[in-house]
Image (tube, coloured by chain):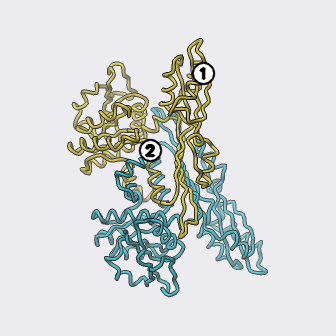
Chain colours: A cyan, B yellow
């Protein structure tokens, strides 16, 4: 059994917990939190919650720590610290800071003989992987990433920060005609506005100025100004009833050409439809935690990304079973 | 530059030749054939054609041989022989015989310090890879493979062997309602007949008994009897005009569940739309030839499949570039 520890018990930590339960070769050993451990109730029988600053006490008792903190402030600090004592895996998704995070985690993991895997999930993660495969196979071509229909936590939070807003949910929606054009191999040039629209469901305080709030959302720089945005005001009850889930998904599509004169066209597409973004991301993390465990068993150390991991390392099957049944 | 040799100059060999031309870090050194070399004209300026039995003379001058022979009788014999003197890659696709082929190639490659990669293409190949990733991420689920719309050479050949048939083209066509049901995550139980139909375009001799030929096609065991098959009799000119290409494609779809009680559903899909099956397969082979080269540079030996190759090995980019631009 691969002994797993989870750091952080928010939506993603819960997703990893469920994934561990559904993988017969894994067991959850402990959950670590920076909240009051008394306030955290995990769903796996017999598993206890400990303060994060006690994690080093578990050295030698946990094979892989899955770090489920946030990318903005948690992971840059905690993944290198954890890598000093454990094999560790995270879902760091601040694209621009990946090289820096990689360097920090690589040093901590290498210096202490551990293996680390960063930026694991679906984007970055499975989408990145597919971009790499597609680009390697079709070097002449163009690829597109569409996200949604799905909930963007960052955009939902941005709306919640507006005066008079009680709660909000924002869906990122790909423009279907753009997706279809890409699927047909037309290689369109698409602006930000032509690729995605933004759909907002907003609960406001009694007497709030809805017109002003709608204007504030639609003109918010970076988040909404460059998109066609629709704002729907709904009640708290409607939000709970119709928008409680955290669905997401999307597609990576590459169309490219082959032939002595690039005269032949091909399209490759990888798509996800996810009822729960954190549960799916947690499932990807669990599979890569298995890979981290296997690499550590081979004595490998240092930081890796999904690009460095052979697909076989993710599987519970033996090499012979894979070749006989999956190839 | 990675120095490539091609064995066999049929459709697949030509596809590899084009892919080598489109990869700036590769050059084609020689083509080997079991036909009369005088009868073979390659399209790459300056590249010569040699008899296959002279291949060992090129030891040390070629980094990777791409073996483009047929799976039925060529590859089981020639890939192990080539692996004695070269790094080698093939697209062996007789699923049931993969374990035996793997063992033979592994011994030859290991004994002689070379690296070999077998069963590379899209199925086996990219489809296998995606099945493995999907199964590892969603251990509770069901996956489906649909092929087409595309030309099946084996089925076209089977029709051509019927008395009175001059030429034929057979398209394998996925049943759209079945694909849609799978995409909706309905996990249908599908018979062979419910997954694919077969569409045949047949040129017959003057005065041939069309009704008899149609009956013979539709009742042919293994090839057509288990499918809804349509037979269209056309002229030689129509065949050349409308059915000269070798398009193919298909989808691997897995729907699975996550959550503490498997209450959440997800669907992952990988799809290909290919104008030319051999050119795309040749492009996959070229990318994996790069991987074989990189592994041999690290001193690795023995046989591998796509499951064993980290995605980074396929790319022309450095690890830093990949992390900065693709992750």
In the image, is residue A158 above or below residue A195?
A: below
- Write the residue at 52% across / 21% down: B167
Disc 2: which chain? Answer: A
Residue B34: x %, y % from top left: 32, 24
In the image, is residue A143 above or below residue B164?
A: below
Is A120 left, or right, of B32 in this rendering? right
In the image, is residue A227 above or below residue B239?
A: below
- Write the residue at 42% across / 32% down: B12
Disc 1: which chain? Answer: B
Q: Which mark is residue A285?
A: none
Which secondary structure, mark 1?
Answer: helix
Whether residue B162 can be seen here: yes
The residue beneath circle 1 is B238
The residue beneath circle 2 is A137
Mark 2 crowd level (few <14, some 14–19, many ≥20, 10 Å Cα): many
- Write the residue at 61% across / 41% down: B175
Whether residue A308 can be seen here: no
**Can marks 2 and 1 be said to lie on one chain?**
no
> Of B152 and B59, which appears nearest the observer?
B152
Residue B61: x %, y % from top left: 24, 36
Residue B192: x %, y % from top left: 55, 41
């Amino acid at each position: 059994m691969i002994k797993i520890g989870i750091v952080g018990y928010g939506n993603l930590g819960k997703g990893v917990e469920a994934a561990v339960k559904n993988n017969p070769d894994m067991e959850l050993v402990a959950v670590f939190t920076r909240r009051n451990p008394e306030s955290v109730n995990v769903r796996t029988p017999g598993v206890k919650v400990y303060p994060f600053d006690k994690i080093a006490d578990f050295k030698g008792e946990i094979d892989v720590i899955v770090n489920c903190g946030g990318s903005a402030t948690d992971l840059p600090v905690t993944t290198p610290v954890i890598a000093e004592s454990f094999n560790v895996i995270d879902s760091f998704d601040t694209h621009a800071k990946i090289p820096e995070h990689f360097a920090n985690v690589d040093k901590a993991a290498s210096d202490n003989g551990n293996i680390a895997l960063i930026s694991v999930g679906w984007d970055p993660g499975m989408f990145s992987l597919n971009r790499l495969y597609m680009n390697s196979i079709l070097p002449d071509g163009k690829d597109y990433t569409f996200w949604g229909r799905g909930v963007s936590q960052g955009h939902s939070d941005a709306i919640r920060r507006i005066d008079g807003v009680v709660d909000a949910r924002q869906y990122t929606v790909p423009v279907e005609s753009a997706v279809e054009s890409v699927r047909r191999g037309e290689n369109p040039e698409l602006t930000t506005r032509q690729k995605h629209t933004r759909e907002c469901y907003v609960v406001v305080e009694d007497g709030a100025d809805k017109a002003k709030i709608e204007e504030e959302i639609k003109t918010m720089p970076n988040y909404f100004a460059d998109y066609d945005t629709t704002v729907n005001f709904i009640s708290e009850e409607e939000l709970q009833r119709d928008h409680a889930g955290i669905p997401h998904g999307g597609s990576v599509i590459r169309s490219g050409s082959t032939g002595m004169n690039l005269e032949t066209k091909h399209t490759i597409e990888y798509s996800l439809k996810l009822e729960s973004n954190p549960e799916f991301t947690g499932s990807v993390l669990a599979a890569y935690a298995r890979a981290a465990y296997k690499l550590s068993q081979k004595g490998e150390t240092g930081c890796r990304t999904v690009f460095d991991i052979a697909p076989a390392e993710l599987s519970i099957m033996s090499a012979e079973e894979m070749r006989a049944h999956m190839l």
